[in-house]
Amino acid sequence: MVHFPSELLFDIFSRLPIKSLLRFKCVSQLWCNMIDDPSLAYIHLTRSVEEPKMLILDHQTKNPDTLRFTEVVGGFLKADMNLVTKFAKSKACFLESCCNGLLCFTKIYDDRVLVLFNPLRQEVIALPPHTASLLPGKRKYGLGFDSSTNTYKVVRVFKFIRGGCHGNLSFNLGAEVYTLGTSSWRPISKGPPCLLAGRPIFACGALHWFVNPYVEYIVSFDVGKEEFGSISPPKYYSSSHLLDLGGNLAMVDRSFDSHIEIWVMKEYEKKEWVKEYKIDVNPPLGILDDFWVEVIGLWEFGEILLRYRESFISYNPKTGVKRYIEILGHDVEVLYYMGSLLSISRFQTE
């Protein structure tokens, strides 16, 4: 076998698809160690040659021994949830957040239990328990990546009671951060300006929650600075949701009867929105109420995948052609997915 310099191997590996690299681990111990090195996973993010896929999370897999990650026809990947539910010791798990191919879950009935899942590597780890004194009620979590330090962080937002004058008590929002590879959570000085809603979207180094209709702005969390902020939407929306569209923060406006609009923030530092797409949703697709239309993301051939109730529709923005996509299963969740080479098992704390 020809021996290549380690520097050359590292450079080659950083440009190869993840599925190929995981197969190459069996070539030698040297290759296995190099492919499992977190530094390769981090640089692989910047040089990724992965084609965007759609990840199907199957919550109703009948065979409990089927723990394999499989590829299905048409740009879809399927991850069996049994590995997560076995690890969490609960059949009911909720996806809190996703970032760079890693998924963060809690138990539905006990969201203090937090696990991290890498579907490509079939690895699940538990995160340390919280340290803050929490009031009853749902907490909000967000998983993000700090490119300045090559670290993954989870932010937890919670309610707490603060005493006031004359014995008056008030409810406040606090937050703490966990950095993957450490042993505990750290409190941060200031929580978000309002209650958060929905699942956060990670884009451009920050997590984003759209809290409309209660507040007319987007709450952001800069993962590197560990600070909350706010972003103004392009206009006030009565019906919308956020998404990651090709690495950019995007917003879907569903306030029309005949179509939806997708606004994209292409220059994040300037906070400028551009109306990028207008998609007609009237028949013959049979969409009667665009409130139920969800834009999942960009995938193969530059098409946009939409979900309408239990149906999936692929839209070609160049031709305007729409086609139905058949996805088997009644309890499935579909996510835009790029995959992660990172082996999270080495970050498991005792």
Image (cartoon, rainbow, N blue to C red):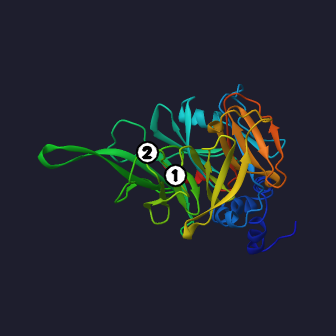
Determine which quarter of the picture holds residue 56: top right
Q: Position of residue 309 (x, y in %)?
A: 67, 32
Residue sitting at the far left: 166
- Which quadrant is the N terminus positioned in? bottom right
Q: Nearer the viewer, residue 253 or 267?
A: 253
SS for tag 1? Answer: loop
Residue positioned 77% across, 31% down in the render: 328
Q: Position of residue 19 (x, y in %)?
A: 78, 52
Name above or below for residue 187 compared with residue 258. below
Q: Position of residue 233 (x, y in %)?
A: 53, 57
Q: Earlier in the sequence, mark 1 or mark 2?
A: 2
Task: Give the amino acid type for the residue marked by disc 1 in the picture.
Answer: Tyr
SS for tag 2? Answer: loop
Name above or below for residue 270 compared with residue 105. below
Q: Nearer the viewer, mark 1 or mark 2?
A: 1
Determine which quarter of the picture holds residue 289: top right
Image side of residue 10 versus residue 154, left or right: right
As measured in the structure, the alpha-carbon distance from the residue carrying label 1 to the one carrying label 2 is: 11 Å
Residue sitting at the far front: 257
Task: Give the amino acid type for the residue marked by disc 2 in the picture.
Answer: Tyr
Q: Position of residue 131 (x, y in %)?
A: 36, 48
Residue 154 visible: yes
Q: Nearer the viewer, residue 234 or 10?
A: 234
Q: Mark 2 — residue? A: 214
Q: Mark 1 — residue? A: 236
Residue sitting at the far right: 1
Name above or below for residue 250 compared with residue 129. below
How many neighbours does mark 1 have within 10 angstroms: few (below 14), some (14-19), or many (20 or more)?
some
Image side of residue 290 versus residue 137, left or right: right
Q: Are marks 1 and 2 in contact (CB under 8 Å)?
A: no
